[in-house]
C-alpha cells in the first residue's frame, strides 16, 4: 500500500509540475518559486546535512526569499535510487542528487573516473570531473541541466569475516559494487560483484548476501556499516561519482536573475567545496573503525602494484568499448589522469 501511495505521490508531483513551472498559473515574477530536490541518502548523511540543506538555504537567501528549495532525502518522493536521473529528466522532480553509476550504460564516458587507479583525492577528482564534463561529456547529460559533479575519496575494501591482505584472499568473495565500472574492477580482482544501492548494503552484509563492500570511509558512518564489518583493507582503488542535475525545462524557465543565482552557487566552486567536504569526512569514518577495535590493513607496495597490474585489463576494456562508439578512449583516460594531476598540485 505504501508503494502505491509513493507512486501516486510522484505522479501527482509530475502533473503539478506540468501545469506550471512555478507551481501557479499566475505571473512567474509574482509567485514564490519552489524547487524540489530528491535524493536517496539518509537525512543524517553529510550529503544532506552539510551540502543539500545548506545549499537550499543559500539559494533562498540569495534570492531574497523568491525561491524556496525543499530537500527530500531517502527517496521520500517515491521510486528507487536508480530512478532519480529519470525523475529529473522527465520533470517528476526539479532537481536530483544521484550517482551516474546507478544508470548502467547511460554515462559511459563518465566511467573513466571510476576506473581503477585513475582518481586522486576527492578535491582533485571533483574538479577534474567538472572540467572533463565541459570538454567531453556534455552530450551524455544533454537531456538535463547538470549543476555540479563531485566525487568521494577513493574507496577501500571492507569485509565482515575475512581479512584481505593479498589478491588471493579476494578470490570468490561476494562483494557489493555500486556501478558497472566498479563491478568490472572487483571482478578483475577475483571477486563476485553484486550490484546494489548503498541503502541495501547493511542488510546484505548482515545476512551474508555479500561478504564485503568497496566504499570510502565516509560512506560507512551514515549507513552504520561499521556494525557489520570488521576488517578494512586500505587500497584507494577508485572513487564514487555524484551528480546534482536539474530538469532542463525547469531550469530554462527560471527568471534570468534566479538562473544566475543557481549558476553562481554550483559549478566548479561547489565541486571544489564538496570534494573537500568528502575528503575531510574520511577521518571520522576511519576513526569509528579504530574505536571499535576493527583491524585496519595496508597493502605493501609490491602487493598494491599487483592490484594495479591485474586491473589494467579493466582500463583496456573500457578504452576498447568507448573507442568502438567513436571516442578516443586512450585520449580520454590520458586527459582524466592529466586533470587529476593538475588539480592535485
Image (spheres, grey):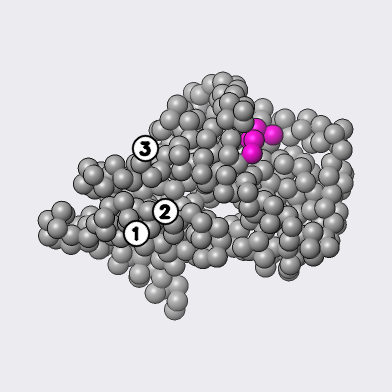
Contact check, label 1 and label 2, Cβ < 8 Å: yes
Residue 103 among magenta residues: no
Which residue occupies 79% across, 65% down?
292
For residue 4, above or below residue 252 = below
- What span is colored magenta in the figure? 117-121
Q: Which mark is in front, 1 or 2? A: 2
Q: Which mark is in front, 2 or 3? A: 2
Query: Horizontal and vertical percent for residue 129?
Result: 52, 35
> Can you see residue 97?
yes
N-terminal-most mark, 2 or 3? 2
- The residue indicated by pointer 1 is 69
Nearest to the observer: residue 14 or residue 70: 70
- The residue indicated by pointer 2 is 55
Instruction: Kindly identify which numbered label has been placed on residue 120.
Output: none
N-terminal-most mark, 3 or 1? 1
Q: Which mark is in front, 3 or 1? A: 1
For residue 312, above or below residue 96 = above
Which residue occupies 68% across, 36% down?
116
- The residue indicated by pointer 3 is 142
Pointer 1: residues within 10 angstroms few (<14), some, or many (20+)? many
Query: Horizontal and vertical percent for residue 281?
Result: 63, 52
Amino acid at each position: 500500500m505504501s508503494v502505491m501511495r509513493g507512486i501516486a505521490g510522484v505522479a501527482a508531483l509530475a502533473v503539478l509540475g506540468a501545469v506550471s513551472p512555478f507551481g501557479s498559473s499566475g505571473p512567474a515574477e509574482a509567485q514564490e518559486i519552489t524547487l524540489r530536490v530528491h535524493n536517496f541518502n539518509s537525512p543524517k548523511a553529510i550529503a544532506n546535512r552539510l551540502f543539500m540543506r545548506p545549499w537550499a538555504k543559500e539559494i533562498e537567501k540569495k534570492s531574497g526569499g523568491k525561491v524556496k528549495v525543499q530537500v527530500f532525502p531517502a527517496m521520500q518522493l517515491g521510486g528507487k535510487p536508480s530512478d532519480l536521473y529519470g525523475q529529473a529528466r522527465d520533470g517528476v522532480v526539479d532537481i536530483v542528487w544521484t550517482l551516474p553509476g546507478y544508470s548502467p550504460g547511460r554515462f559511459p564516458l563518465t566511467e573513466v573516473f571510476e576506473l581503477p587507479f585513475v582518481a586522486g583525492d576527492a578535491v582533485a577528482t571533483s574538479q577534474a570531473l567538472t572540467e572533463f564534463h565541459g570538454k567531453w561529456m556534455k552530450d551524455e547529460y544533454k537531456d538535463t541541466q547538470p549543476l555540479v559533479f563531485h566525487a568521494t575519496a577513493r574507496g577501500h575494501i571492507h569485509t565482515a569475516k575475512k581479512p584481505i591482505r593479498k589478491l588471493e584472499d579476494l578470490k570468490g568473495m561476494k562483494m557489493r559494487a555500486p556501478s558497472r565500472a566498479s563491478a568490472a574492477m572487483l571482478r578483475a580482482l577475483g571477486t563476485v560483484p553484486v550490484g546494489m544501492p548503498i541503502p541495501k548494503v547493511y542488510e546484505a552484509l548482515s545476512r551474508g548476501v555479500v561478504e564485503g563492500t568497496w566504499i570510502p570511509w565516509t560512506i560507512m558512518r551514515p549507513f552504520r556499516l561499521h556494525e557489520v564489518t570488521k576488517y578494512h583493507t586500505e587500497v584507494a582503488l577508485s572513487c564514487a561519482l555524484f551528480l546534482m542535475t536539474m530538469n532542463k525545462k525547469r531550469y530554462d524557465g527560471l527568471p534570468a536573475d534566479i538562473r544566475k543565482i543557481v549558476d553562481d552557487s554550483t559549478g566548479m566552486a561547489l565541486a571544489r567545496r564538496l570534494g573537500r567536504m568528502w575528503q575531510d569526512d574520511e577521518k571520522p569514518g576511519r576513526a569509528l573503525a579504530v574505536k571499535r577495535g576493527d583491524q585496519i590493513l595496508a597493502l605493501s607496495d609490491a602487493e598494491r602494484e599487483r592490484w594495479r597490474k591485474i586491473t589494467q585489463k579493466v582500463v583496456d576494456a573500457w578504452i576498447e568499448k568507448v573507442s568502438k562508439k567513436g571516442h578516443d578512449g586512450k585520449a580520454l583516460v590520458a586527459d582524466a589522469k592529466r586533470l587529476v594531476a593538475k588539480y592535485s598540485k
